[in-house]
Image (cartoon, helix red, strand yellow):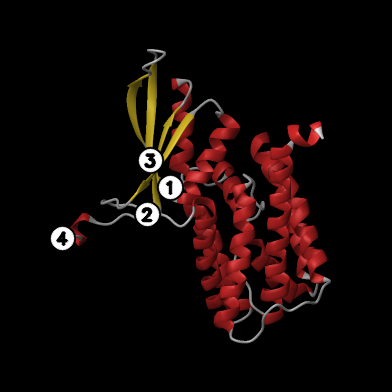
Amino acid sequence: MEFLQKHRGKILNYLQIIAGCFITGFAVNCILIPNKLSTSGVTGISQMMEQFTGLNYSYIYYFFSITILILAFFTLKREEFMKIIFVSFLYPTVLVLTRMFHFVFVQGEMFLVCIYFSLFYGFGSGLVLRAGVTFGGTDTIARILNRKVFKGIALSKIMLILDGSILISLGFVFNKDVALYALVNHVICIYIMDYMLFGFRQKLYKASIIPHDKEDSEEISRYILGLGRGVTLYNAVGAYTKSDKILLSSIVSPRQSAMIRSYLAEHYPNAFMEVSPIVTVYGVGERFVRIQGED
């Protein structure tokens, strides 16, 4: 009993990850696959490979997942690697298991199928992301490419290029309708995951960060810039300690805010982070409103 109380947070975290993996696995094998649809990410790549090899896509996913995990081991930091190792084994296993059920949740009108799939997949993925881990898919590939190959390109742009390339490829391997529905799935899932991470509120947030040590501000700034966001640095003074500090300010999306929080928790656990909702941001940037376009 004492063990359960001591590790209650970790146990709930793992249960949340397991639940998220099973929900996403259900969405893929009981909604997406029976309706001959596809989606972006490693799932889409695996489905395309199934067309050429005849192998079950879930086994191909397993192969890609382990391959990405090995690459991550040699290229990413230990903290980043540990974030994906559990899900890299769990999720492909769940795909193999749920594929055996041969259960069809919904079939028929394709747009309705997309809605059902996106709801389940987005909700399951949101649970996993809220637990502070990732699926070790295209987001990890993008991080590896950003770290070792395309160092001058923002991480968000690499992810966009990867997912965009997969969606376009689906049109050639299957047909344009499958690619279009995959795009619809992708967009809806992103919104649902955003809401899972930060609730049904504003789409932009102001993240204010004060590192414990001034020297850490450079690395934190580099990480935020890698997400495709700008950062403003201010000189500040701690009222209690009377020590000089650096205040970092950035306007980010809900998902990016959660990513920054996870990054700080891993690398700079003593940092202070405040997140405030933003109604509108006027200027040039992702989800910003151009000043010229407003009265």
Q: Is residue 148 above or below residue 89?
A: above
Q: Earlier in the sequence, mark 1 or mark 4?
A: 1
Q: Secondary structure at mark 2?
A: loop
Kindly report the distance in space between the C-alpha atoms of the residues bearing marks 3 and 4.
25 Å
Label 3: how many Cα within 10 Å (few below 14, some 14–19, many 20+): many
The answer for how far apart the CA atoms under marks 1 and 3 are is 11 Å
Dot 2 and dot 1 residues touching (CB under 8 Å): yes
Whether residue 76 is visible, yes or no, is no
Mark with earlier residue (2, 1):
1
Mark 3 = which residue?
A: 250
Three-letter code for the amino acid on which mark 4 is drawn:
Asp
> Mark 1 = which residue?
228
> Distance of mark 1 from mark 4, alpha carbons?
28 Å
Counting from the top left corner in percent of width and height, residue 61 is at 74, 62
**How far apart in space, not on screen, are marks 2 and 1 (Cα)?**
9 Å
**Which badge, 1 or 3, comes first in the chain's sequence?**
1
